[in-house]
Image (cartoon, rainbow, N blue to C red):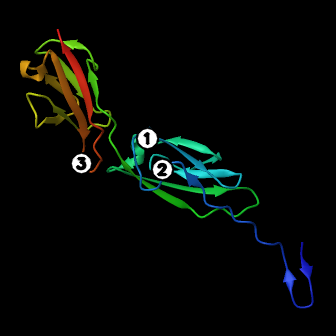
Amino acid sequence: MVLISNEFMVSNPPSPKMRRPTASVKNNGTIQVGTKITFTSPDSGNVVVRTASMSRAVSKKSPYTYAMKAKDFVRGRAAVTVHATRSGHTNSDTVTLTYKQRLRNVTANPKNNAQIRVGAKIRFTSPDGGNVVVVTRSKPKGVSKKSPHTYTTVARDFNKRVANIKIHATASGITKSNTVTLKYRQR
């Protein structure tokens, strides 16, 4: 619609602009592979999300939850761009969120609370690769080896027939995993 007045010509008013979307995980946070982040547009509509693992951005109805993939992280960092869109509206400004990667916890085989013998082999694996650090009574400063790491128990690891073994994963440029204490009972 065009209105013409003596001195002014007014055409269609500009489209309303969408507000920036929000994320359930704060910008500059530390997250792991598999962390789910929900992107929400304050206005109804879609959110358009792109990460390093996507060949192109995806547009999904708000709210949209995305689970971070290993490929989203480059040298321990991930960047996610997101904006809101809706028909008849101007897109919101694009928001770039950055996250630091924390390694996922190390797994063990046999599992925690198993009964084992002196000389038993325990396989420790970091799901994200890197090194596994194993701290025992016989190795109080820890032993670091590339994942998967097979550790052979010795008699000094046991105190009153129980071995408490602390493990965590490390990798260059990535926040180490949580330290987990495993307990093994001697047969």
Q: Quadrant of the N terminus?
A: bottom right
Examine the rendering and report whether any part of residue 4 can be seen.
Answer: yes
Q: CA distance from mark 3 to mark 1?
A: 19 Å
Q: Tell me which residue sits at (25%, 25%) in the image.
A: 182
Q: Amino acid at mark 2?
A: Thr
Q: Secondary structure at mark 1?
A: loop
- Does 127 sit left or right of 31 as displayed? left
Q: Secondary structure at mark 3?
A: loop
Give the answer, above or below, for where 49 lies relative to 132. below
Residue 12, given in percent of the width and then of the height, sits at: 83, 72
Other-residue count near label 2 (Cα within 10 Å), few / some / many at <14 / 14–19 / ≥20: many
Q: Nearer the viewer, mark 3 or mark 2?
A: 3
Q: Nearer the viewer, residue 91 or 19?
A: 19
Marks 3/1 in contact by CB < 8 Å: the verdict is: no
Q: Amino acid at mark 1?
A: Lys
| Residue annotated with mark 2 | 51
| Residue annotated with mark 3 | 172
